[in-house]
Amino acid sequence: MKKTLAIIGLGLIGGSLAIALKGFEDYEIVGVDVSQPTLRYASEHGVGDRVTERAADVLPQADVVVLALHPQGILDFLTEHRDRFKPGALVWDVCGIKTAILEGAAALPDTVDFVGCHPMAGTEFSGVEHAFGEMFRDSHFLMVPRETSRPEHLALLERMAAWIGCKDVYRTTPEAHDALIAYTSQVMHIIAVAVCDDPTLFDCKGYEGSSFRGCTRVAALDVGLWTQLFSLNQPALLEVLDRLIGNLQSYREVLASGDREALAKKLAFSAARKRQMDLPGPDLLA
Amino acid sequence: MKKTLAIIGLGLIGGSLAIALKGFEDYEIVGVDVSQPTLRYASEHGVGDRVTERAADVLPQADVVVLALHPQGILDFLTEHRDRFKPGALVWDVCGIKTAILEGAAALPDTVDFVGCHPMAGTEFSGVEHAFGEMFRDSHFLMVPRETSRPEHLALLERMAAWIGCKDVYRTTPEAHDALIAYTSQVMHIIAVAVCDDPTLFDCKGYEGSSFRGCTRVAALDVGLWTQLFSLNQPALLEVLDRLIGNLQSYREVLASGDREALAKKLAFSAARKRQMDLPGPDLLA
């Protein structure tokens, strides 16, 4: 008999996982959502093997549970359903912060093996109708195990990550994850929205190139989700944001000074860091 | 007999133009460069129809001259060769600032029709070996005519822009161009280098997603070129940079306040601007 892998929340990420995980080993992929239009769309488009709105019915049978909700939704779900998980189940989430989530998971019974995860993929769209199975191709899969995490579950997660196309799996701690993500992801979103606040935004159509599109692409974000992600990681994000503003001001000063030699030296320093950082990455033009 | 179109400077942009313009109407594309390795590479890889190191020999025969040098190189070339251009020739440049270039072009004889141009395409690489003919596909072509510009030359430029794949041609003034470019391009490059100055840059490998790659891609810039571009557009760039720092600080404040509702409102405002700005653009995932 097939094992059950339940995905709670068929939004952009959950829906994409439900597509990408189809056919993985001997698991039946069951999509769970509270929205009837989402369930209908998922059912009609093969998002998962089957769908249901009844999490309470699926959880006792589910060997693996993926929580693909907004951060607060994950915390609420863990509280509401803490006693419904199948003993021995692996439960993992996909959200972009880990400290708050792992604190919430601490309330689970010992029989549930919770591992914080973060597949670093996504688009600026949301909803199951934008889900696609190739989303995770060549992306990083971050994994935050707990001390009690079972090795066979970590191995299972690695196989799932490979199946959906992730290029590597990194293990880390909640604190290290959240500090780095504040830099590599959250502040990129703050930059994108801050750039779009410029009063000349609407004048610049026809004058934008790939650097503008690349930098601002993520500004059209899911407001509810990112309000939670930013707020739940506030201290780390403020630190990174202050460092960024300081670095921008430092560029402002050298530019204002009119000292071309100093400007060139500063640019050479930064450009060399970027080149060094990317080597030997394949992502330069991605 | 074929007409002559000379491209001065076979770097990334000039080389790409020399490839992309091959076959355009009845023009022979002549690539001009002072570097022997560049000329050899161009000759061996079909960059242009033929190449030469002798600008002084080509200019008197050239019906169209494209200046694809760094800004200071363009200004120096115009001074050195002002009396060598063929009477009635169309001369255009491709560089990312226009006020300083058009000031330099004012010294040309009346017989030369100079039009400032800016095809908004490029990569973070430089040199003829990174040139490719598809570079201009779907990009904007900005055109800054002078009062005396001949309509048939503007029409010729529009045909060239279409031939190399640009999706549209916008006409503007030097001042408007430089103010908008400070925002859409120059400050994107300042952001990219400032982000790479963060001390945690090298720790973040494996933790970066598409937003980080999109924002920092252009940080590996051509230092000499960008030092000139920034310096020659200093006042406009400082204005945009100050506005950006102000917008980032405004996000910092609302985040530090812990007021989630205010943060959500601010994010909703910015995200809606981005969505409105992109409509009905095809570039969302570019």
Image (spheres, coloured by chain):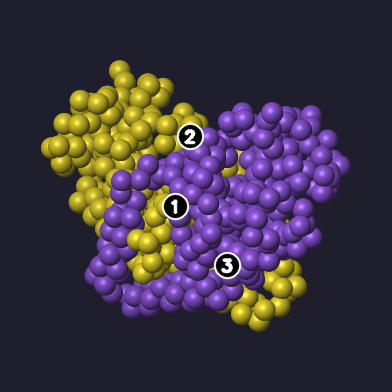
Chain colours: A purple, B yellow
Which chain is home to disc 1?
A
Q: Residue at x 75, y 73 (%)?
A: B261
In the rendered image, residue A102, in percent from the top left (x then y), is placed at 60, 64
At a point 64% along the width and 49% down the height, the residue shown is A88
Give x and y (percent) for residue A146.
53, 60
Tell me, yes or no, if residue B231 can be seen here. Answer: yes
Indicate the quadrant where residue A98 lies: bottom right
Q: What residue did someone put label 3 on?
A: A99
Q: Residue at x 25, y 67 (%)?
A: A265
Quadrant in which the C terminus of chain B is drawn: top right
Residue type of the residue flagged with mark 1: Tyr
Label 3 vs label 2, nearer the camera? 3
Residue ID for mark 1: A170
Chain containing the residue with disc 3: A
The x, y position of residue A23, in whole percent, is 61, 28
Indicate whether B181 appears above or below A90. below
Q: Residues within 10 Å of mark 2 (few under 14, many from 20)?
A: some
Give the image location of residue A192, x and y in percent.
57, 60
Q: Which residue is mark 2?
A: B137
Q: Is residue A59 above or below residue A227?
A: above
Mark 2 lies on a secondary structure that is loop
Give the quadrant of residue A21.
Answer: top right
Tag 1's secondary structure? strand
Q: Chain of mark 2?
A: B
What's the distance in space between the residues labelled 1 and 3, CA to CA? 16 Å
Name the foreground residue: A190 vs A28. A28
